[in-house]
Image (cartoon, rainbow, N blue to C red):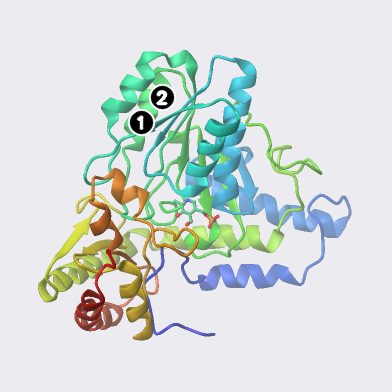
Amino acid sequence: MTQFPVYLDHAATTPMRPEAYTAVTEHLLEVGNASSLHAPGRRARRVVEESREAVAAILGVRAGDVVFTSGGTEADNLAVLGLYRARRAEDQRRTRVLATAIEHHAVLDPVERLGEHEGADVRWLPVDGCGRLDLDALKSELAAAPETVALVTVMWANNEVGTIQPVAEVAALCAEYDVPLHSDAVQAVGTLPVDASTVDSLALSGHKLGGPVGVGALVVRRGLSPQPIVFGGGQERDLRSGTLDVPGVAGLAAALLASMGDLEVRAHHLRTLRDRLVAEVVESVEGVTRNGDPDDGLPGIAHLSFAGCEGDALLLLLDAAGIAVSRGSACSAGVPQPSHVLLAMGVEPLAARGSLRISLGHTSTGDDVDRLVEALPPAVARARRAGTGR
Ligand code: PLP
């Protein structure tokens, strides 16, 4: 197995847990379509249903609420597009979509498409300087005309800066106005205790929690019927057609189960490593700003801005030193863009461009932190000499 010397990009994808690897490989050589009626099909179905029950039990919902998908992106798309279309079909007045300005592109882009092509009136909800949703803004949008809101979408925890959102308060507001709430919990499930019954629909992804890539789930509460976005064999209660990935689903369930086993110990370990990392970087490099909520963020994420640097240059210099970190936000056609999350938090575009997301996970060690702390000062000095190319 190839292991990058220092891997600090767990929020992008985290190594597979041994339990998930065992579950996936155990089923890879077994034949059987979970929709077939014969014995191999029934065996495959049993694996899927046992996995569904395990996922549902961990998330505090009924097994029938769990719809397996190809990952977080598809789960978010199904929730956003499917709920909007279903709610609008029931009542044409429901055109408003309320979404935080810091959503992942898996939510952001379908919401934008609804605005551009399907008559949605999109309202981007502001966040504070830590990246936390402004609840008053949500309340006034809801109170203004609740009968026109198709859905609200608020992520559980942000993938760039790690800030945890006030989901319980948001859910209470949505319930008060009888509006469905979707939450992209891709970064939260497996890292935080998540009770999916708090919200009406919730997205999760296998490879973010130590399961395989290409499998995820949408949890949709009983009575809520998003319109499907993929059509075919009618699998997954007709919500998501396509032959089920039995090894993937078994791997997802095994990873989730394993991640529950060490949730608290891991969170404590990651927080300790992360806080040391931040303290030592701030100590050894001038002009560093920490982004996100220092008290209520994902335990493994440190998001830092380095004044006078281009984030990409810094990333590549660290990469050359054998350390994998992330910009946290995507390039557009190869051109570095300031992150929409940081801009929404009020960070200046130039400072936003000089930012890195360093994310720790279940395989991270103190040695990883030491190596990063050692490599950063010379890398920052070099990146600063290259400048921001303004
Ligand atoms: N939502 C969030 C918050 C994410 O961080 C990601 C992945 O980066 C996704 C959705 C997309 O998940 P997937 O990679 O499983 O499609």
Work out whether residue 220 can be spotted: no
Position of the C terminus, as image quadrant, is bottom left
Position of the N terminus, as image quadrant, is bottom right
| Residue for point 13% across, 66% down | 287
Secondary structure found at label 1: helix
Work out whether residue 248 can be spotted: yes
The amino acid marked with disc number 1 is: Val
Residue bearing the label numbered 2: 174
| Residue for point 81% across, 44% down | 233
Closer to the camera in the image, 240 or 127: 127
382 relative to 211 in the view: left or right: left
Whether tag 1 and tag 2 are in contact, CB under 8 A, the answer is yes
The amino acid marked with disc number 2 is: Cys
Q: Position of residue 158 (x, y in %)?
A: 36, 50
Q: Counting other residues with Cα less than 10 Å from the Cα at mark 2, is it few (<14), some (14-19), or many (20 or more)? A: many
Closer to the camera in the image, 343 or 285: 343
Tell me: residue 205, above or below residue 100.
below
Tell me: residue 271, above or below residue 181.
below
- For residue 168, which quarter of the picture? top left
Secondary structure found at label 2: helix
| Residue for point 27% across, 83% down | 371
Closer to the camera in the image, 187 or 342: 342
173 relative to 291 in the view: left or right: right
- For residue 137, which quarter of the picture? top left
216 relative to 365 in the view: left or right: right
Q: Which mark is residue 170?
A: 1
Q: Position of residue 349 (x, y in %)?
A: 27, 53
Q: Position of residue 304 (x, y in %)?
A: 24, 63
